[in-house]
Amino acid sequence: MKRILSTAVAMALVISFASAAGAETKQEYQHRFKLMLDYAVRTNEYIRQRLLDKGLAAYAHAMAEKNTSAAEQMTPPSQYAGLHPHFLLVLENIERSLFFAAKGELGKYRHYQRTVRKELQILEVLAEREHLELYMWDRWR
């Protein structure tokens, strides 16, 4: 019961965040970008270390779905137009990998994780060119 309640509260917060996800200024985009990416990467790493907990992976998948949906509604400033598709690919592939982790289909999970790693490398190069820090805190790697 406690788990269901905490899931419902978290989902409500993410849904309210998603409705305000359209970024209009460079600063707004940067803040949302950093928060959403950092959240996705940290969640991804946390689940990677706990792959046998399918319930936890299902919860993380639901959150990743909302995070990805909110990112799809963002409008990047022209400076970040080339970076945004890779940002979306990272979030989408994390979401897909978590879906398969929750199902216990680890082969498919690993497939999407390989794509996440490749897209993160591309995103890091593009962000560095734009002098945009990707992570709000030290990386969990």
Image (spheres, rainbow, N blue to C red):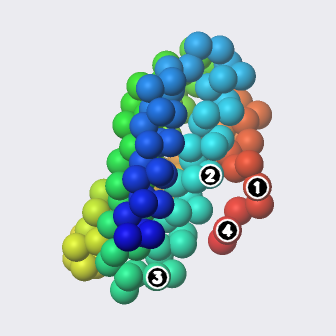
Q: Residue at x 74, y 42 (%)?
A: 133
Q: Are marks 2 and 1 in contact (CB under 8 Å)?
A: yes
**Residue annotated with mark 3:** 50
Q: Secondary structure at mark 2?
A: helix
Q: SS for tag 1?
A: loop
Crowd tier of the residue under label 2, counting other residues whose Cα lies within 10 Å: few below 14, some 14–19, many 20 or above: some
Q: Label 3 crowding class (10 Å Cα cut-off): few <14, some 14-19, many 20+? A: few
Judge the density around disc 1: few (<14), some (14-19), many (≥20) Cα neighbours within 10 Å.
few
- Residue displayed at 67% across by 68% down: 140
Tell me how far mark 3 sits from mark 1, CA to CA.
Answer: 22 Å
Q: CA distance from mark 4 to mark 1?
A: 9 Å
- Can residue 85 be seen at all in this image of the molecule? no
Task: Name the residue beneath numbered marker 4.
Answer: 140
Q: Which disc is residue 137 wearing?
A: 1
Q: Give amino acid for label 4.
A: Trp
Q: Is residue 132 visible?
A: yes
Q: Is residue 109 left or right of residue 30?
A: left
Q: Which mark is residue 16?
A: none
- The answer to the question of whether label 4 and label 2 lie on touching residues, with beta carbons closer than 8 A, is no
Going from the N terminus, do you reach mark 2 or mark 1 first?
2
Instruction: Name the residue located 22 percent from the left edge and 73 percent from the top edge.
Output: 103
Q: Amino acid at mark 3?
A: Arg
- Which quadrant holds residue 126? top right
Mark 2 vs mark 1, CA separation in Å: 8 Å
Q: CA distance from mark 3 to mark 4?
A: 15 Å
Marks 2 and 3: CB-CB under 8 Å? Answer: no
Q: Position of residue 2 (x, y in %)?
A: 44, 69
**Residue 61 rendering spot, x and y as whole percentages:** 36, 59
Q: Which residue is mark 2?
A: 38
